[in-house]
């Protein structure tokens, strides 16, 4: 479990203040994956650094599995940090050491006996699907294999929490998928609590249970994937359910409709057709399964002169989120 309360981080640059985190509060339950999405400069890396306490927050608290970190002494911090595994964008491996040597590194730092280290390294490499690659150097491994080594290393000290900062940004789509599946599988099997930083909504959709949108150091929207997707007015819903851009319709009202849960598009559209005796022209559409529920987004054009207010009412009564796009 990760609990962040009112975290602020202000950097001083000469006589200027940069507010990198402006009152961030967040809870991530054990065994789940929480995505943090935001543009460059939003404060994502600062958040990670404050969580590992590589950076001291200006104010606020961070607690990881009940251990309060923000006020901890340096010795306590070293112990607490071991409970946090870090996965970086480029793996951050030591080039001079083999895959096994990289995974052994954190264990050596805490003076684990050699035989135990060897045993644990073999276990970890097998856990991430890298049996047989023990003696390979990072330069001999693919990007995906390097990231697997990075994940094995992050797990070496049996962390409760995994912080992943853009873990797949340097990978091609197929390797991204493999690494995401691995992170998801490890989270479930080891009951990890994972905070995953990304700028890609595809990553959030693929493995996150919940998501926060960070912007200018503030969390703008946060919640389980299904909930934020179903909130049509929220910033995340549109990003989760992208619609292809379309040329504006020549005439007639254009609506954007969001379906969630049970309501399917056809009954609703045929409902409009029957009830209002008009044709509905579908301009664009997409359907996604998020958190096990189906979501659909449609852009439809009503006949010119149609009773748009009536249609809006009808849709809302049927628990379909709708807004006028034109
Ligand atoms: N060490 C620092 N000193 C001054 N400003 C910083 C420092 N680190 C980050 N910032 C500023 O804090 C803001 C958030 O940065 P960062 O956390 O790196 O964003 P992100 O990872 O989302 O791109 C930016 O405006 C950045 O310029
Ligand atoms: Mg960053």
Image (tube, helix red, strand yellow):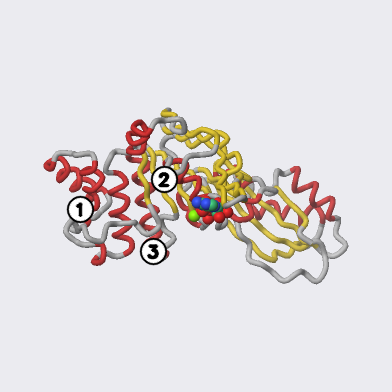
> Residue 181 appears at what percent x and percent y?
38, 52
Q: Secondary structure at mark 3?
A: helix
| Left or right side of 146 for 56 | right
Q: Secondary structure at mark 2?
A: strand
Q: Residues within 10 Å of mark 3 (few under 14, many from 20)?
A: few
Q: Which mark is residue 101?
A: 1
> Residue 273 appears at what percent x and percent y?
76, 57
Q: Front-most of 55 and 179?
A: 55
Position of residue 190 relative to residue 12, above or below, is: above
Q: Image point 45% across, 48% down: which residue?
A: 196
Q: Image point 23% across, 55% down: which residue?
A: 130
Q: Secondary structure at mark 1?
A: helix
Q: CA separation, marks 2 and 3?
A: 22 Å
Position of residue 224 relative to residue 171, above or below, is: above
Q: Which mark is residue 163?
A: 2
Q: Residues within 10 Å of mark 2 (few under 14, many from 20)?
A: many
Position of residue 223 relative to residue 169, above or below, is: above
Q: CA separation, marks 1 and 3?
A: 27 Å
Labelled pair 1, 3 in contact (Cβ < 8 Å): no
Q: Earlier in the sequence, mark 1 or mark 3?
A: 1
Ligand 2 contact, mark 2 (Cβ < 8 Å): no
Ligand 2 contact, mark 3 (Cβ < 8 Å): no
Q: Front-most of 68 and 319?
A: 68
Q: Earlier in the sequence, mark 2 or mark 3?
A: 2
Q: Image point 23% across, 48% down: which residue?
A: 105
Mark 2 vs mark 1: give the one in front: 1
Mark 2 vs mark 3: give the one in front: 2
Q: Residues within 10 Å of mark 1 (few under 14, many from 20)?
A: many
Give the residue at mark 3. Answer: 174
Position of residue 97 relative to residue 232, above or below, is: below
| Left or right side of 25 for 266 | right
| Left or right side of 297 for 55 | left
């Amino acid at each position: 479990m990760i609990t962040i309360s009112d975290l602020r981080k202000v950097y001083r640059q000469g006589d200027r203040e940069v507010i990198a985190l402006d009152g961030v509060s967040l809870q991530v339950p054990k065994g789940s994956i929480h995505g943090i999405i935001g543009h460059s400069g939003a404060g994502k890396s600062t958040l990670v650094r404050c969580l590992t306490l590589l950076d001291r927050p200006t104010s606020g608290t961070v607690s990881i599995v009940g251990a309060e970190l923000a006020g901890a002494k340096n010795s306590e911090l070293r112990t607490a940090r071991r409970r946090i595994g870090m996965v970086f964008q480029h793996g951050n491996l030591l080039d001079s050491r083999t895959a096994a040597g990289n995974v052994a590194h954190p264990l050596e730092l805490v003076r684990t006996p050699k035989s135990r280290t060897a045993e644990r390294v073999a276990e970890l490499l097998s856990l991430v699907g890298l049996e047989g690659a023990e003696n390979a150097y990072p330069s001999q491994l693919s990007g995906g294999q390097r990231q697997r080594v990075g994940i094995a290393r992050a797990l070496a000290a049996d962390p409760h929490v995994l912080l992943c900062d853009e873990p797949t940004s340097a990978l091609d789509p197929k390797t991204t998928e493999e690494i995401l599946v691995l992170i998801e599988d490890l989270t479930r099997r080891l009951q990890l609590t994972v905070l995953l930083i990304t700028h890609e909504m595809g990553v959030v959709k693929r493995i996150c249970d919940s998501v926060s949108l960070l912007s200018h150091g503030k969390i703008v929207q946060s919640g389980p994937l299904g909930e934020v997707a179903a909130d049509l007015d929220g910033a995340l819903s549109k990003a989760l359910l992208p619609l292809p851009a379309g040329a504006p319709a020549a005439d007639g009202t254009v609506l954007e409709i969001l379906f969630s849960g049970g309501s399917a598009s056809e009954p609703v559209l045929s409902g409009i057709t029957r009830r209002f005796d008009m044709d509905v022209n579908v301009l664009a559409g997409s359907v996604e399964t998020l958190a096990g529920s189906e979501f659909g987004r449609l852009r439809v054009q009503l006949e010119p002169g149609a009773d748009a207010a009536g249609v809006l009412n009808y849709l809302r009564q049927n628990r379909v989120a709708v807004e006028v796009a034109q």
